[in-house]
Image (cartoon, rainbow, N blue to C red):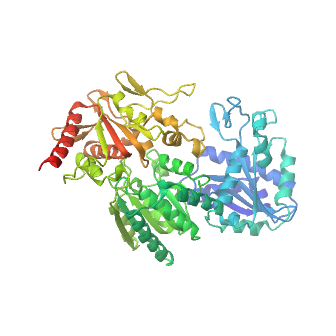
Amino acid sequence: MELWQGDLPDFIDFGRSPVLVNRMVDAFASIYKRRPQESEVRSWKDSLAVVADVADRGLATDDVGVVVEYHLPLSDRRIDVMLFGTREDGVANSLLVELKRWDSVSLEDEFARNVLVGTEEHVHPSEQAWDYAEFLVDTHSAYVEAKLQIQPAAFCHEMTSGGATALRDVRFEDLLRRSPLFVRGDEDKLAVTLAQQVGHGDGIRLMQDVRSGKFKPSKRIVESLVAVLTHDDEWHLLDEQRLAFNAIWADVQRLNHKRSRSSVAVRGGPGTGKSVIAVQLLAEALKSGMTAVHVTGGKAFTKVMRGTFSGSQGLFKWNKDTRNAPPLGLDLLLVDEAHRIRETSDTLYTKKVERNSDSQINELINSAKVSVFFLDEHQYMRPDEIGSTRLIREATAARKIPLREYDLSAQFRCGGSRAYVDFIDYLLGFTSEAPDDFSGQYMFELAADPYDLENVIDLCADGSARLVAGFCWEWSDPNADESLVDDVVIGEWKRPWNRKEKKGKTYKDQSHPYTLWATTAEGQEQVGCIYSAQGFEFERVGVIWGPDLVWRDGKWVGRKKDGKKTVSFDRGLRGASGEQLTQLQRHAYRVLLTRGIRGTRLLCLDPETRDHVAAALMQLRSTAAAP
C-alpha cells in the first residue's frame, strides 16, 4: 500500500509541481479516512521536489518504478521513497531512501547511538533506512523469495556537510557502509548511486512485484522462533494445553482450506497457558508455510515477546497494526490478550474528525482467513477495552463467520493451583462459589510491612521475583542523570516505578524499559505497575494493594481519591467512575495477584481491606480444617 506509484518520467514531472502531493493527499484521505497533517504535506512538497531533481540528472532510462510513502505490511511505518530497477551487474534491485529535513544534529556523548535534533532523540536516518530494509527482507514475499535485492540510504537534503559531522562520526562507520548517507551538496553522488542501483531497466515490473507481494516471514525468523520454543521449557505444551493446541490446530488446518473467513475463541484464566498455545500455533503455522502473526493490545507484553524471540519484530505486532492490513492477507491471526481489544484502533486522544470508520474487531477479522482470539474476560483494564466473548460472537455472527469456542481450566501458574486462582476470584467477587483450600499447593502470605514484602526478592537468588503495585503513586520521568525517582513511598520505605519510556527516544525491543524490568536484574529494584506486569509471570511476586480499591460496608469500592488525596494515578481510567471504576480496579488486582508461579506475598495499605483479606483467608483454612 502506498500514497503514489508510477514510472520515473511521471515522478519527475509531478514531483516538481503540486500534482504529486495533491494526489498523495487524496490517497491518504482515502486510505486513512482523515486528512494528513499540514506539516507532513509541507515535508512532502519540499523533499520530493529535491528527489525528483536528483532522479532527473541520474537516470537515463524511463523504465524505473517509483513508490512514494510505501506502508510497511502490518506496521504503522511508511518508507519515504523506493525506486526499482536493475543494477549494473544485472541484479534486480530496489533503492530505499529515508528523507530528512534536518539541518543539524548532535550526539549526547561518546556512548550514544541515537542522535539529537534539538533536545529530541532520533534513530540515525541511515539506521532507520537499514531497519526498514531488514523488515522487508524478513517479511515481504518479494524479498523473502529473493526476487530482488534492496539497498537502503538516507538523504538529509537541507543539511550541509558541516551539519552532518555527528551523523558521520566514526561510531557509524560500519552503518554508513551498509546504508549510505547523502546531504546537501551530495546530489551528484546520489544521482550516480541511483544509476548504479536501479538505472538499467525492468523497474516497472519489479515495482509491481512488490506492490502485489504479501506478508511472508523469512526462514531465518521462523527458525529463530522455533529454536526458542524447542529449547525453552517455559514454552512447552503440557496436558490440557496440548489438548487445546491439537484441537485448535486441526481447526485452523480445516478452516484454512476454505476461502471464507472463520474464527476461534479460546477462554482461560491467568496461568492457563493462552500465550503458550498462541505462540506454538504461530510457529506451527509458519513451519507449515502459512502466513501468520501474533498481535496484542499491550505494549509491554509485545516488547518482551520481541526481545525473547530475536529478530521477530515482524511476527509480534499490535492490534492497531491490522488497521490498514489487506483483506485476507494472512492465513492465521493470533489475537493474544483479546480482552484488550478496543472500540477502534484510535486512542482516547485521537481527534473526532480523525477517528477510524471501522471497529477494531472487524479490522482483526478482516486481515486473516482464520482469526483466533485468546481472552480472559476479567483482565481488561481500561474503559475503552471491550474485548469479550459476546463481542466476538456478535462480530462473527453479523458477517456469518463460523466461530468455534474452547475453554481452558488447567492451571500452569500459581503452583498449578486452580484453587488459589479460585480464591482470588472469590475474594474479588468474580464468583460466589467458595474455593477449596490451596495450602501446600501455593504460598500466599500477608506482609507486615514493605520490608517484609520485599523479602520475596531475596527468596529468588536467580532474579525471578518482582514487586508490583496498584497505580497509587505518580509515575515520574527519570532525573537528568537517568536515575529514577522513588515514587512508591510507604513510610520510610521508598522504591521507583519501573523505568518510564523517554519521550522522543527510540528503543530496541531488547533494551526497552518494559523488557529490562521483566527480564533483567534492573527490575528487582523497581516496582511494576499493572501495564508492566500484565501477561508475565515470575517465581514469586510481592504485591502492594493500595487505597484505590477498598472494602467498605460489605463490598468493593474503586476510588480515585480518598477525601482530597489522590489515590489513583492511572490515566487509563479517565472517564471511569462508579461501578465501572470498581470493576476495572478489581481486574487490575486480579492480574497482580496471579503473576506468581510459586508464591505471592501481599501488603494491604488500607486496614479495613487487609482485615477483609485476612478474614477470607482464615475462613478458607478453618473450613478446610473442619471435620
Compared across the picture, whether 219 is left or right of 545 comes to right
The N terminus: image quadrant: bottom right
Image location (x, y in percent) of residue 122:
65, 39
Compared across the picture, whether 455 is left or right of 42 comes to left
Q: Looking at the picture, tell me which residue is in the foreground, 152 or 441.
A: 441
Image location (x, y in percent) of residue 61:
86, 63
Image location (x, y in percent) of residue 105:
71, 34
Q: Looking at the picture, tell me which residue is in the foreground, 408 or 580.
A: 408
Q: Residue at x 51, y 77 (%)?
A: 259
Image location (x, y in percent) of residue 587:
32, 47
On the image, which quarter does residue 546 sit in?
A: top left
The answer to whether residue 323 is above or below residue 99 is below
Q: Is residue 358 visible?
A: no
- So how many labels did they put on this image? 0
Q: Is residue 96 visible?
A: yes
Q: Residue at x 53, y 61 (%)?
A: 293
The answer to whether residue 20 is above or below residue 448 is below
Q: Looking at the picture, tell me which residue is in the foreground, 17 or 374.
A: 374
On the image, which quarter does residue 604 sit in?
A: top left
Q: Residue furthest left?
A: 627
Q: Residue at x 29, y 38 (%)?
A: 445
Q: Residue furthest top?
A: 492
The answer to whether residue 623 is above or below residue 522 is below
